[in-house]
Image (spheres, helix red, strand yellow):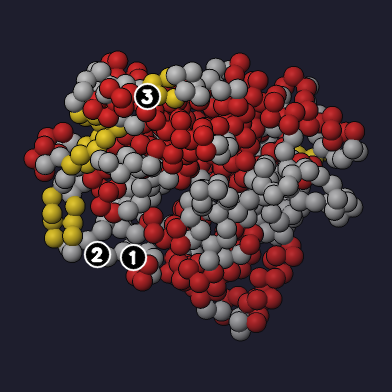
Amino acid sequence: MPAMPSVKKRSSTPWRRLAPALLGCTIGCAVPPPEPAGNVIDAIVLPMLQRSNLPIVRESDLALCRRMAIDLNGLPPTWEEAQAWCLGRTPDEMATHFMERASAPSAPDGSPPYVYINRRWWADRFQYDSSYYPATTFYPFVRDLDATVGELYAGHIDYRTFARRALASPAFARRFGIFDANQDLVQIASQAFRVFLGREALPSEAEDFGGLWRAWSGTAMSEADSQIAYPDCPTIYEGGHRKGCIHVELGLDGARCEGALRAGCQSSLFGGAAVIPSSPRFVRAKALPPADRLAIETPGRLLAARPEFAEAAVDLALRKYLGWWKAGWYRPDYDLPAVRDALARKFVSDGYDLRALEREIVTSQLYVQRAERPADESIGDPVWAFGPTKTLYGEAWLDALGQATGKRVGACEFRYNGYLAAPNLPGYIDPPSFRPGFYAAIARDLGGGPIASAHGDPSGLVPAITRRSALATLCAGAFPPRKGATLDELIDREFIALGSPPSEEERMQVRARLSGDGCDADQWVQCDQPAVADSLCQGLFGSAQFLYY
């Protein structure tokens, strides 16, 4: 993030109208350490910084505002939002604003931004099925699992309840192998361990634990029955022709666990826990009796009782917001066991409240401190002595670009391979015409979702060739110069998308670039101003400064 210029300049652009008193903590402010009891992370990290003679410096209001807005809402703040909710505000006040905003412009269903961005994040975590035919017929189950994620981040259920419901979801079972006789129970159990215990299952554990899903089975319903059971079941198209809606129904097949097969439906390593259907026949998931509904939550209930369950949730949240947490092959400074232990204890004492856990992280010194290393500091200082720096994942880059240019770039329907149309991207990235849009495919091209792979590595940089194509289309005419506007006003207006004004060095670089393009910055009124605005737009939004936050 660029250093901010002093607030004393020439014109009346939005940045320069600010009185110095409004700027609060601007370039990185030394702040007195809070009382240790205020934040369980700070109670550990602040003494470590002091013992190591490392400065305790909070990030500037605007840089922290952008960091928190992207992490909690998926979009940089608008200038009006940054001015109203970030300048002069505490980290706790910023977190409250971004976690409790009422609606998300980019959410097709209007859900709160903090809820929506985490539903999108868990879509990658659960690896929702992205193949077209199964995803279409399977959509109602995925929609239900997605709604459960929404309940978690809205604060309606705790993390233990979430684990029970998620692992009892037909969407989870179907995604990892349950379909008629084609079952990969080891894969289902392994994914359950990865998601909720944060580790790989031992072969013996996966084979034993997978038996708890053995009773699950699937069958195709007729089109008529599908329309009755699921009126909103999406229509299937093949070759541009309507084929109808044939839903894949999942449920429990009691015949899989009868007689000698009974032992295969239980887990010996987990105390003989079993999932035995109450009926020997197939009963679809929507019609399960209460006893069976309780039984299918057994896998989640068992994992939530494990001592590492809370620690894994903490590790997941720390990696999400810090980036460097558990990010290396070897980790001398990449995790702080005392921090994880303290957060895990608080998580348990808070009743597994995930919102409270994430708030504790984003208001801690590990998160709010300045990310830029001062010139007089050692390159050998530990990674936890600096704030996080991460790359924008593909969807956030698209959404942020759309917000900055004022052009609609589509809305992600992450639950299945259906997209919402977006007229402003190059045609070559659109899918076949019988599909309803483009978004998921282009987001994958741009670097994937919040977690780009099954390994949980953060998305890489947006591929340059795709970035250039999108920018060329979205930047054209995005910043029409106003009559009488100065070059500095145009530069400031574009930099608002970064959440901070340009430094004097950046302003000079822009002027030098214009001179190289044949536009004398001192003779601004004689330049091709729309072309200059287009050039500035492409340069800014394709820069590392915009890709990192």
Q: How far across and down, in percent of the image, does residue 176 sit?
A: 38, 42
Q: Is residue 370 visible?
A: no
Determine which residue is flagged by label 3: 263
Badge 1 crowding class, 10 Å Cα cut-off, few under 14, some 14 to 19, many 20 or more, is: some
Image marks 3 and 1: residues in contact by CB distance under 8 Å: no
Q: Quadrant of residue 506?
A: bottom right
Identify the residue at image location x=61%, y=64%.
Answer: 543
Q: Is residue 4 visible?
A: yes
Image marks 3 and 2: residues in contact by CB distance under 8 Å: no
Secondary structure under badge 1? loop
Q: In front here: 196 or 383?
A: 196
Pointer 3 or 2: first along the chain: 3
Image marks 2 and 1: residues in contact by CB distance under 8 Å: yes
| Quadrant showing the N terminus | bottom right
The label shown at residue 433 is: 2
Disc number lying in front (3 or 1): 3
Q: Is residue 42 left or right of residue 259?
A: right
Query: What's under tag 1, amino acid-wise?
Result: Asp
Query: What's under tag 2, amino acid-wise?
Result: Ser
Q: In front here: 313 or 279?
A: 279
Badge 2 crowding class, 10 Å Cα cut-off, few under 14, some 14 to 19, many 20 or more, is: few
Determine which residue is flagged by label 1: 430
Query: What's under tag 3, amino acid-wise?
Result: Ala
Badge 3 crowding class, 10 Å Cα cut-off, few under 14, some 14 to 19, many 20 or more, is: some
Secondary structure under badge 3? helix
Q: Is residue 387 left or right of residue 188?
A: right
